[in-house]
Image: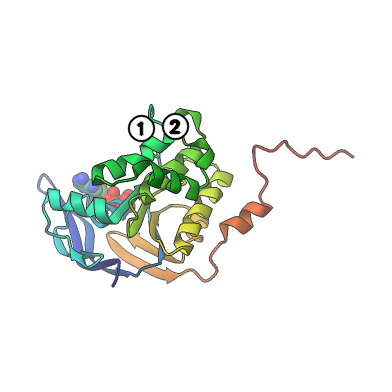
Amino acid sequence: MNIIEVHRLSKDYVMGDQVVHALRAIDLTVEPGEFVAIMGPSGSGKSTFMNLIGCLDRPTNGEYLLNGEAVARMNDNALADVRNRYLGFIFQNFNLLPRTSAIKNVELPLMYAGSKNRHEKAKAALELVGLGQRMDHKPSELSGGQQQRVAIARAIVNEPVLLLADEPTGNLDSHTSEEIMAVFQDLNHDGKTVVIVTHEEEIALHCKRIIRFKDGRIMVDEKVKKQTNAREVLQKMPNPDDPPIVVTA
Ligand code: ADP
C-alpha cells in the first residue's frame, strides 16, 4: 500500500473577487520507505501541498489517500485523529515547549494518544536520536541541533507512518544541518517514510527523490542519482566548535 496517494488534488484560495490556484490538479504517489524533498520558488504551492498532506487543511478538489484512508473530505475531528495516528511533524523553529524538559516534550504526543509506558517510549525515542544524556534539559539549555533532535524524537515517538518536515535545517549552521540530515537518513534507512521541504539544493540531495513545484504544479519529479551520505560528509567537515587549526610557517 502507498503511504501517499494523491489524485487531481487542487486548492483554491478566494481573496475577495480573485481566486488563487495554489495547487492545480496534482497527481502523486509516495511509497513506504521513500525519502522525498519538496522544492520550488516562493509561492509555488509547497506550503499548501504540505498542509494538505499533513491533514491540516482540505483540498478544493481531488482525492488524498493517506496510508489507504481517504482523508480529503474528513471533518476536523477525523483529520486530527488521522494526524495523531499516522503523522509526525518537524518544523524549522522546533516548536518545543520552552519551560518543559526534553523528555516531557517528547511524552506530549503519547499523552494525547493515551499511550502507556510514556516515559520509557520517550526515553527510547531520545536515545534513538542521540540525546539520551540530555533528557532532563529544557530547550533553552540545548543547542539548536539538540532542540531539533528533541523535535524529531517527539515526531517519531508515536511511530507514525510518515514524517513531514518543513525546512528542518532552515535555522541551523551547515555542520548541524548535516547532523540532522544524518538522523533523517538513519530513520529512513530503518524504513521510515520522510518528506521534507527545503530550498537548499545541497539538503535535497540527501533525499532519494526531489519533487519541484512551480505555479501550483509539479514541474520535475526526479530520482536522486547519487544520494549525499551525511555521515561521510560529517567525517570530512570540520566541527565549528573545535578550536581553529592555526597554520604557522
Ligand atoms: P510556497 O510554500 O511554495 O511559498 P504557498 O503554498 O504558500 O507557496 O502559496 C501558493 C500560492 O497560494 C501563492 O500564490 C500564495 O500567495 C497563495 N496562498 C497561500 N496561502 C494562502 C491563503 N491562506 N490565502 C490566500 N492565498 C494564499
Gap between marks 1 and 2 measured at Cα: 8 Å
Q: Are marks 1 and 2 in contact (CB under 8 Å)?
A: yes
Q: Is residue 159 above or below residue 174?
A: below
Viewer-side residue, 43 vs 11: 11
Name the spot of residue 2 as percent of width and height, x first.
29, 70
For label 2, the SS is: helix
Q: Amino acid at mark 2?
A: Pro
For label 1, the SS is: loop
The residue at 14%/62% (across/down) is 61
Q: Amino acid at mark 1?
A: Leu
- Looking at the image, can residue 187 be seen? yes
Viewer-side residue, 193 vs 30: 193
Viewer-side residue, 201 vs 147: 147
Name the spot of residue 133 as percent of width and height, x first.
53, 38
* Mark 2 within 8 Å of ligand 1, using the beta carbon: no
Q: What numbered label is drawn on residue 48? A: none
Q: Which residue is mark 1?
A: 97
Q: Is residue 246 left or right of residue 237?
A: right
Q: Which residue is mark 2?
A: 139
- Looking at the image, can residue 39 be seen? no
Question: Exactly how many numbered labels are in the figure?
Answer: 2
